[in-house]
Image (spheres, rainbow, N blue to C red):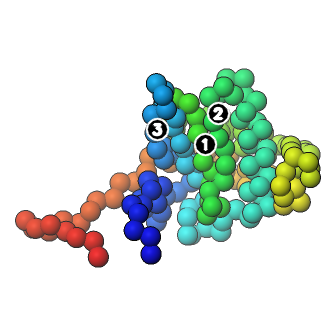
Amino acid sequence: MLKENLIASFQVDHTKIGPGIYVSRVDGVGGDFATTFDVRMKTPNKEPAVHPNAMHTIEHVVATFLRNDPEWKDRIVYWGPMGCLTGFYLIVKGRPDPRDVQPLVLRAFEHLRDCEGPVPGATPVNCGNWLLHDLPMAKWEAARYAEILKTTASYEYEKTERPGTAGGAFYDS
């Protein structure tokens, strides 16, 4: 068993996360900051994960959109899938609030929802697994998530309280 400390994204209580956009971490880089957002499309461990083929297509289409957005393109550092297939990480320069990036993410997912193809970069020359794509399913997932962003998205992780004892210390097992 690894004895290293858990990284920040594994310290979030995944039984209390719903779809939304959350600040996962903020890192100092030189004299600036880089903010990592948890762009959560699914409720972990309750909803089916996004299919790998759709996830791959979402990655290609949304990354292309983000890196070409006139307002944000110079601030986009990274867009990539979570291993659990319930969402993506978006890293941007600076310290914007999740509500600041929500319109950008919404536009990206609406763009994907309305996309007619071809999937950008889905060729043997441009992609390491170019056949692992599913545009119709990616469009379905994008439409679903865009609606969530417009209606019920969350923007702050729920805080979990550590149990206490009357006058004593609490130790995890």
- 45 versus 134 height, above or below: below
In the image, what residue occupies the spot 51% across and 29% down? 94
The reply to whether residue 153 is visible in this rendering is no
How packed is label 2: few (under 14 Cα within 10 Å), some, or many (20 or more)?
A: some
**Separation of residues labelled 3 and 2 (CA atoms):** 15 Å
| Viewport quadrant of the C terminus | bottom left
Which residue lies under the disc numbered 3? 27
Closer to the chain start, of discs 3 and 2, is: 3
Question: Residue 140: x and y, percent?
Answer: 77, 55
Question: Residue 112: x and y, percent?
Answer: 79, 44
User: 161 left or right of 49?
Assistant: left
Question: Residue 1: x and y, percent?
Answer: 44, 75
Closer to the chain start, of discs 1 and 2, is: 2
Quadrant location of residue 141?
bottom right
Which residue lies under the disc numbered 2? 76
Q: Nearer the viewer, residue 79 or 162?
A: 79
How packed is label 1: few (under 14 Cα within 10 Å), some, or many (20 or more)?
A: many
In the image, what residue occupies the spot 71% across and 35% down? 66
Q: Nearer the viewer, residue 31 or 94?
A: 31
